[in-house]
Amino acid sequence: MTTNVPGIDPTVPPSGPGCMECELARAWWFHLRRCAQCGHVGCCDQSPGRHATAHNASTGHPLIRSYEPGENWFYSYDTGEMYEGPPLTPPEHHPLSQPTPGPQGRVPPDWLAHLH
């Protein structure tokens, strides 16, 4: 399998176990996405913050990968399509002990009402 895909750097580790911006704001997320180019972990578009898409808009990095356990799909902001791609530097998902939505202790009881 080739690892020379524009927009994917399989050697870069993820930025952390959760959405960087939500962590700074002490906010919460629904699902997590990892930038395939720089490793930035942001929350999905259903999350209140939509930080993965905001990262794409500010950097132009075209591809994300799911950062959820059991999911290994890539998504292209440029084409709007899903793809398969190379393995990325571990960890390939958030910690199994971290609930979805997460993180524990910051998710409001009415979290479903806050999804997009």
Image: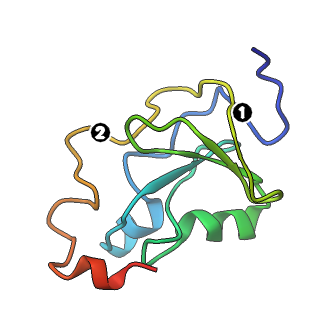
Of residues 14 and 83, the one nearer the viewer is: 83
- Residue that mark 2 sits on: 95
Residue in view at x 85 percent, y 38 percent = 6
Q: Quadrant of residue 3?
A: top right
Image location of residue 113, percent across then percent down: 30, 85
Residue drawn at x 39%, y 78% is 115
Q: Amino acid at mark 2?
A: Pro
> Disc 2 on helix, strand or loop?
loop
98 versus 90 height, above or below: below
Q: Position of residue 76 (x, y in %)?
A: 74, 52
Mark toward the start of the polypeptide (2 vs 1): 1
Q: Residue furthest top?
A: 1
Residues at marks 2 and 1, CA–CA distance in whole angstroms? 22 Å
Name the residue that disc number 1 marks: 9
Q: How is the image coloured?
A: rainbow
Q: Residues within 10 Å of mark 2 (few under 14, many from 20)?
A: some
